Image (cartoon, coloured by chain):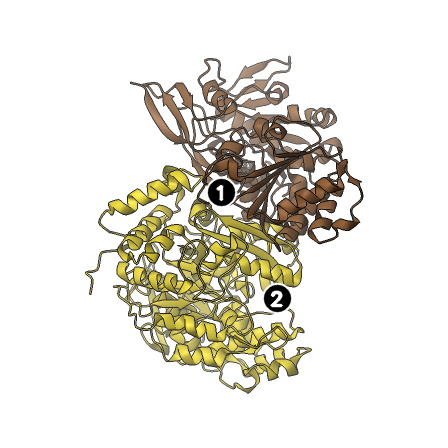
Amino acid sequence: MKELLIKNGSIFDPITGINGDIADICIKEGKIVDKVSSHAHIIDASKKIVMAGGVDIHTHISGPKVNTGRLMRPEDKLFRGTYLGNNVRQGKWMEMGSSVPSTWKTGYSYARMGYTFANEAAMPPLFAAHVHEEFKFTPIIDQTAMPVFGNNWFCFEYLKNKEIENNAAYVAWLLQSTYGFGIKCVNPGGTEAWAWGKNCVDIHDTVPFFDITPAEIITGLIETNEYLGLPHSLHLHGNNFGNPGNYEHTIKTLDLASGYRARNSFGREQVLHNTHLQFFAYKGDSWGTIASGAREVMNYVNTHQNITVDLGAVTLDETTTMTADGPFEHHLHLLNHRKWANSDVEMETGTGVVPYQYNKDTAVNGVQWAIGLEIALFAKDLMRVHITTDHPNAGPFTRYPRIIMWLMSQKARDTTLESMKQSERVVRASHIASLDRELNLYEIAMMTRAGPAKALGLSGLYGSLHKGVYGNVAIYDLDPESLPADPNQIETAFSRAVYTIKEGVIVVKDGTITAEPDRHTIWTNVSMPENKQVMRDISEKFSTGYTVNLENYKICNEHVHNPRAIEVREIKPN
Amino acid sequence: MPKIIENVGCPYCGCACDDVRVTISDDGKKILDVENACAIGYEIFKRTSYEDRIILPRLRQPDGSMKNISYEEAINWTAHHLIQAKKPLMYGFGSTNSEAHAAAARVMDLAGGMLDNCATICHGPSFLAIFDNGYPSCTLGEVKNRADVIVYWGSNPIHAHPRHMSRYSTFPAGFFTGRGHYERTVIVIDPRHTDTANTADFHLKVKQGHDYELFNAFRMCIQGHEKDLPDEVAGIKGQTIYVIAEIMKKARFGTVFFGMGLTHTDGRNHNVDIAISLIRDLNTYAKWAIMAMRGHYNIAGSGVVWSWMFGFPYCLDLTKHQYAHMNPGETSSIDMAVRDEVDMFINIGTDAAAHFPIDAVKHLKKHPWVTIDPHITMATEISDLHIPTCICGVDVGGIVYRMDNVPIQFRKVIEPPEGIMDDETLLLKIAERMEELKKEGEER
């Protein structure tokens, strides 16, 4: 395979602590190496920044609810703003859609931004075959998918009875059956309650008929995760999502993790990843009085090392919200009266989809925008705070470069703030106007590759430039010695990578797709002794509750695209 | 020794039952017995072992007869005509696997043509309603485990989806519905006294073509305006409407299953639109879902696959090369055919000759017509080229999407007759050949 030598770039690699040093990066046979031969293809990166390929820790790009969003929104195909690429065909396939792009456009768009890895954050296990089919048709990027467990009837029963070992055996079986990566939990208990038209808005509410509380589900899943020693931690979208005044409940939820320590061999330190924190950091008691609770929530996160979070930053766009938090989507459609899709999934979960417009001239949306950025600006350790938009919920992932711009430039924030019709209300209800912090490139590298890779337990393979990781590299046209005075140029630079390199292959040059090498499905294979009781429970439930037979539920190898297993060996209990 | 294969998926209707037991002969070539399937599913499996199965492509000769040709010749013929055509149409897809749906997208993207599926003559109006109003639905297991009120509106599962009622909706005992149909209230709304209506607790014989009014009346009741109801709406007494509305409102979990009776009567997409609005209203009081009774076992699949590829489920116009376009009426198969806009037709996984209006068929017949189908159908008999393929779910596996969009992995049960290709392989070979021809400079 071809060798590659990237010369004289300014390297930003927080995993190894390299902060802007001029150095060379060598790639051979798809991996980063110490040196290459004189035949290597040379890329001159002088006066440019070099980072590992971006890693998205939380995005919704493949699977049934994403596809429902695509299907029910033909109008989404009409938005062709330049920020969305504007290019209809660069690669082998045409690129369609904006807030819910086609699989092709998804892969191409990530690559153009210098990203090479994305974690599909919610896979309904029953629909795993669909998720993996979409992986097959998503170009360039490697992907993981996280099965949802927070409303799973098996977990309810095991966790109610405090049977962590059995729950762990079930989780290990399900990860194998669906080629899943880790434990995702969305509105624990609440989505099950939604199957009866109800919800669990507090961690101490009781799930109808199951006699368990969200708090017990969350702690049970943390214990299960650490029992197994999975690469990633519990990945939580908690209860009381998106409601004014929820920040105190969020802190209460985060506090469930206190006392737990990470147990794994992947370098992960957190036991809980609270995703899209923006939606959980609201003060006030109504939409009229909504205000930022970012300071309080981040005070908690800053002082608790066993927690990581991602932003879920609002980008002020027209988008398509979609989540396994079924009751929330129902609630949202009652607010905006737009079309509403819902799909409750037997024994496992549910989902909802509603289009939404984040309008910069609406005070609520302005405050949400401020909160998303404040979470990053209040953060002490940016390795534990990652850039996401909860794509497409708070905005499309194609807006990451703009979020980077806002975080790096107070001027850019002020310009946006001043353009808001309700800017005074936004200023009163948030801290954004008083924050003069401007993040540097090293911190951006933490938030977009090093931090997410570490939190996923994958920093030995992705998100870094040290010897032995996959040769995924992004080169951006910014000179760290003289950053542009116009913040828009920062956005442009991160929108159009000069080079994106995927395992040694140049996939993007000057913001244009140049190659579409094969990509992989990363999944977690846990070796566990056979658990007869759990296997009996599984076959019993499949003969009664499910409408798909057990043998057809497990994904056949032939339906998984280039699987790359992360092996988890049993760790001896403490 | 005959061998028994369990957990086989059935390639008939949108139920996509995956519990069929098939007994095959020792050599793995013949199906001896089929259990658990409905009468129609049984026939589909049994028919594959017929001695007279077509195993070679057949090309129509100048004298009107059909002559066997090789697959290579058939692929070349098709690729050549696709390149020559200005606006070729590939239509069908209800009865093939999702791998073939994706391969077809590749072919028609290369050809710069039109791509459409059976929804265009079936649940297309449902898609239009979904575009406008969403789709509050669920998987069939939710109905089985929770539903205490079932409404079949303009659908007749006993005939169209024979195991639907026993496996998913009316009869099965689920987790919260341990006494099966004793715990369920079944309401059938249909102008005809169907066999499904015979099983119902309530049969509302709606006046044909007046479904929209009846939905409106239900919405009035749900929203608290029952006192303003006229004495009769759409042929149903106001008091009856009120009684049914109260049952709906007090349901623990209700589901509306609707079929062609809504999408192909007066009102069409508007009927489905207001049905969805009714479900939205009901969810303020109770839990309700709605589901389209999709016809073929994998008609949902092509909508799913093309949505992730192009963002549209049917009526795709890929002629613009740079972007896809969808506008039913303009880009729908029947409309294009009736206007004689299509200059080549490929029919796959359904029988257009049997289902399309005769005017549409006459126009299509003027141009090259290829039918890709395992069986002899009306379409194969009038086409210029018939390419036989494997039968999905019998001699080739693959992923299919059930009517609730749940993916089911279908498996291969018996070996296909020697030399016969499956749809995906055939389509990819056509795509390959087109690329070669394009490289060689053959353009229209």
- Chain rendered brown: B
Which secondary structure lies at badge 1?
loop
Front residue of A322/A480: it is: A322
The residue sitting at 58% across, 58% down in the picture is: A330
Residue B152 appears left or right of A376: right
x, y (%) of residue A512? 52, 59
Q: Provide the chain ID for the residue under circle 1.
A: B
* Residue type beneath disc 2: Asp
Which dot marks residue A317? 2
Q: Is A545 above or below relative to A500?
A: above
Q: Quadrant of residue A301?
A: bottom left
Q: Residue at x 34, y 61 (%)?
A: A220
Q: Colour of chain A?
A: yellow
Q: Position of residue A511 (x, y in %)?
A: 52, 63
Q: Work out whether residue A527 or residue B215 is closer to the camera in this orientation and state it.
A: B215
Q: Nearer the viewer, residue B396 or B171?
A: B171
In the displayed structure image, the side of residue A457 where residue A137 appears, left or right:
right
Q: Is residue A95 visible?
A: no
Q: Nearer the viewer, mark 2 or mark 1?
A: 1
Look at the picture and state if A454 lies above or below B26: below
- Other-residue count near label 2 (Cα within 10 Å), few / some / many at <14 / 14–19 / ≥20: some
Give the Cα separation between the discs numbered 2 and 1. 31 Å
The residue carrying pointer 1 sits among few (fewer than 14), some (14 to 19) or many (20 or more) residues within 10 Å by Cα, namely many
Residue B335 lies left or right of residue A33; in this view the side is: right
Identify the subunit bearing mark 2.
A
Q: Which residue is mark 1?
A: B406
| Labels 2 and 1 within one chain | no
Q: Residue at x 49, y 78 (%)?
A: A294
- Three-letter code, disc 1: Val
